[in-house]
Amino acid sequence: MIRKNPEANHFLYFHNLDGLRFLAAILVVINHIEIFKSNTGISNISHIPFIGKMGEHAVTLFFVLSGFLITYLLLSEKEATQTIGIKNFYWRRILRIWPLYYLIIYGAFFLFPHVDLFYVPNFTDHIPEFYVLKSILYFGFVPNVAIVILTPVALAHHTWSIGVEEQFYLVWPVIVKYMKKLVIIFLAIIITYLSIKVITYAIWKFGYFTNDNVSRQLGFIVYRVVELTRIDSMAIGAIGAYLFINKQLPSKIIFAWYFQISLYIITVFLLINYPDMGVFTSEIFSILFILIILNLALNKNTILNLEFPVLKKMGRISYGIYMYHPIVIALVINIIGAYSINNIWMDNMIIYIAVIVITLLVSWISYRYVEKRFLGMKDRNIVGNLKESMSSSPTQQRNVIGSKMERVDK
């Protein structure tokens, strides 16, 4: 049953989104299994467009989902309290993201390079290169810049998306709290982002504006950094939240059964065939994904149902699945390489079963015994604020109630 916030009169729980998170996380795992197999010389299918790109699209889905949920939380709090508690927002994000992030980064820099079972060909050997600068960028939450300008860090490469999320969390509550005409601001962000991406792509690929190789190389670096920032995907998700909260969502159209069928057919077709859409690929998929999210979360007549207990439980540990799975893949593939039975079908079956089972187990243990302790600190902070506000004004009390809307996220 969907619960509501009595102050903001908005949903506190969105159906199907936990299941959607889990499915996106599993797609990333499958994609990375094939990439790891390719790097180690094991027969793989990463060359198939759907397999080779599914991780990228799943991460795009995560970004759109974050933009939708975070903007929904911020707008709901602003409506209920006439303000946004930015400090509390940052504190909740720190408790949710930082413990696991820094655990992985610490392991990637100081532990895994010294253990043969976690060796990754073409990655581990390059960790010592530009070591200090890499450390600063990864520990400073800008790994998306590090992976463009520096050699990769084994088993931490995937944290670029977490860095992007943290950069988004840093600026977004300020924008939502202080800016007016938000939908115009969101559109302006998307247009500005696309303009920079198109111009730098043109400089890199075609030498527009300059034929200097140095300039073209610089264009490539800027293009890749901008491309990995992905603020466009999160802004597209934010527009979906804004239209919903302000009752401007054309629900009669996008919630219609024929629209849903067309939406899923188009999405599956593009995922499987992957036609060349150039620099606009992530934007096109982001639009499709926000329409899917809106239907899954808000449409009582959705034709796709992910609201199963097992999917909901797996969705709650999806952050751990995303963070731990490269470590598990490296471990399993190195063990298979040492004890292969020289049967490609059997080896692959063992790899997939072992990776998925171990990843789920490690993620559940992490959530149960590590992450929930920090989440509990977040909840205790909310309860403490609530007790403190009992003698405060009604407006201050509403501010504390609004902070409880964090339940929607993660």
Image (tube, rainbow, N blue to C red):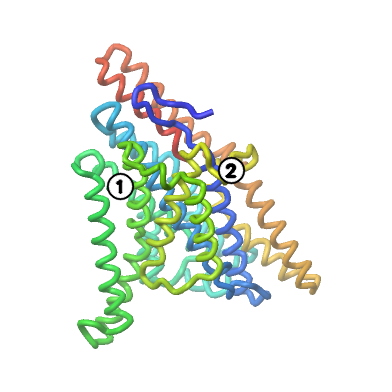
| Farthest residue, direction top | 391
Q: Earlier in the sequence, mark 1 or mark 2?
A: 1
Q: With respect to residue 344, does 381 lie above or below?
A: above
Residue shown at the point (67%, 67%) measured from the top left? 334
Residue type highlighted by circle 1: Leu
What residue sits 49% from the left and 47% below the top?
100
Residue position marked by numbered label 1 in the rendering: 170
Residue 305, disc: 2
Looking at the image, residue 207 lies above or below residue 184 = below
Amino acid tagged 2 = Asn
Q: Which type of secondary structure does the marked residue at label 2 adopt?
A: loop
Q: Quadrant of residue 75?
A: top left
| Contact (Cβ within 8 Å) of mark 1 with mark 2 | no
Q: Residue at x 32, y 13 (%)?
A: 390
> Is residue 214 visible in this depiction of the protein?
yes
**Coordinates of residue 253 in the picture (x, y in percent):** 41, 46
Q: Position of residue 61 (x, y in %)?
A: 46, 54
What residue appears at the point 50 percent right and 53 percent down from the top-left corner? 104
Locate residue 342: give its quadrant: bottom right
